[in-house]
Amino acid sequence: MATTSPDNLAKVFKAYDVRGIVGEQLDEELARATGAAYVEVLGVDALVIGYDMRPSSPSLAGAFADGATSAGADVTMIGLASTDQLYFASGHLNLPGAMFTASHNPAEYNGIKMCRALAQPVGVESGLAEIRDRVAAGGSTGSTSGGPRRTGSIGAHDVLQAYAAHLLALAPVTGRRIKVVVDAGNGMAGHTAPAVFGRLADQVEMVPLYFELDGTFPNHEANPIEPDNLVDLQKAVISERADIGLAFDGDADRCFLVDERGELVSPSTLTALIAARELAKEPGATVIHNLITSRAVPEIVTELGGTPVRTRVGHSYIKATMAETDAIFGGEHSGHFYFRDFWRADSGMLAALHAMAALAESDRPLSQLLADYARYPLSGEINSTVADQGAVLATLEATYAGQDGVTVDKLDGLSVDHADWAFNVRASNTEPLLRLNVEGKDESTMARVRDEVLATIRSSK
């Protein structure tokens, strides 16, 4: 089956990106056709392209560039980059952009994240469906009404140092000297962290883990939402007597924390911390949180005088809602953090700098600093592969809807709320999984609800 066939396109064009198995679902033919369609559908005349460390990324990025130039656009290649570095380039250069990465997915995958100028999102509701349909239709004839279309040019521009300087201007780290262990997971943080932390040599002692760029992920998958992938970082934080540990995913747009005890920090807790810091700069501002974020986040935002706004999961939805509300900050429980001053884009590195800045300004260890923002026990995200996701969601709704004190909504998947507990079950946008997140007023309540819901989900296998 050709990768540009409608059947395959339906599989690889997701809610807010393109993603598939290299060679089988995603190849240079599809990348080239997508590059041309991207230019034609969005009316692009120039763009930036970056790519991660996966072995297939340079050739796929090159094919996309060929397609874009064949459609008349000029291309600026920024080379190896994290996704937030690509967003920086889009904002800094005021150009649309495309990033080649499959983020946290295993080595056999790759993908394309696209944006308009100033890092504005391109999702299924904002151009991605039209790009898919243009690829399926075979694209254009390559000419305009006035004759043959011009072929665009390809150039190069290094933005890494400008990116590092911009992030540190947004979240300067001052105060006491701190020791930081950074696990790049052989992903793109191995490229960006030296540039950023190199400017903090007098303030930060950095201990690197797995900084070698290697898209085969020889040490562990670059997916820090899975606790097994954080074990090495936890051990290193304890053995190094570090103040904080940072774990990035493959394209370094997500960041997870480990405290000085080696304990995992909930992304919801980090969301609340950053929200407090941003609200201190702009009292009364709006803060976005997605529907799987702990209810502690909107509670804290409200207590601090801000306005919390709830949205569905996914960067295109978060960014659109931030633009509509002029929100100063947005956080997702999956480890994505979005900043108005960073063109409303997500940056794992900027989130890390906020945590480090708060720590350096305090005389307390990280665990004590964050205790103010962690109110409810959380299950973390639990993934299950099921044969019929829709049937499972329907069964769960039938089980819980109508129970005393329970409310249900379907903004994204199924959210079930009770005064003492809450859970969300939603289908992954990138993998054949159902994702469960549970919280409760105490550990036993959370565990009970978690086990009840999981039993329903996994009985369908």
Image (cartoon, rainbow, N blue to C red):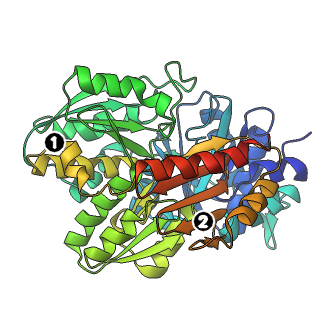
Which residue ends up furthest to the front in the rendered image? 404
Label 2: few (<14), some (14–19) or many (≥20) C-alpha neighbours in 10 Å: some
**Which residue is drawn at the image coordinates 40% and 53% (left, top)?**
442
Residue 325 placement, left or right of 124: left
Apparent side of residue 313 relative to residue 91 in the rendered image (left or right)? right
Q: Amino acid at mark 2?
A: Val
Which residue is drawn at the image coordinates 32% and 22% (left, top)? 235
Q: Is residue 1 above or below residue 35?
A: above
Residue 209 screen position, x and y as percent: 35, 24
Find out whether the residues at labels 2 and 1 contact each other: C-beta distance under 8 Å: no
Q: Residue at (54%, 49%) from the top-left corner?
A: 448
Q: Earlier in the sequence, mark 2 or mark 1?
A: 1
Q: Position of residue 130 (x, y in %)?
A: 76, 66
Quarter where residue 397 is shown: bottom right
Residue 245 visible in this rendered orientation of the protein? yes
Amino acid type indicated by mark 1: Pro
Horizontally, residue 168 falls left or right of residue 334, namely: left
Write down the residue under mark 1: 365
Residue labelled with disc 2: 416
Is there any visible trace of residue 357 in the rendered image? Answer: no
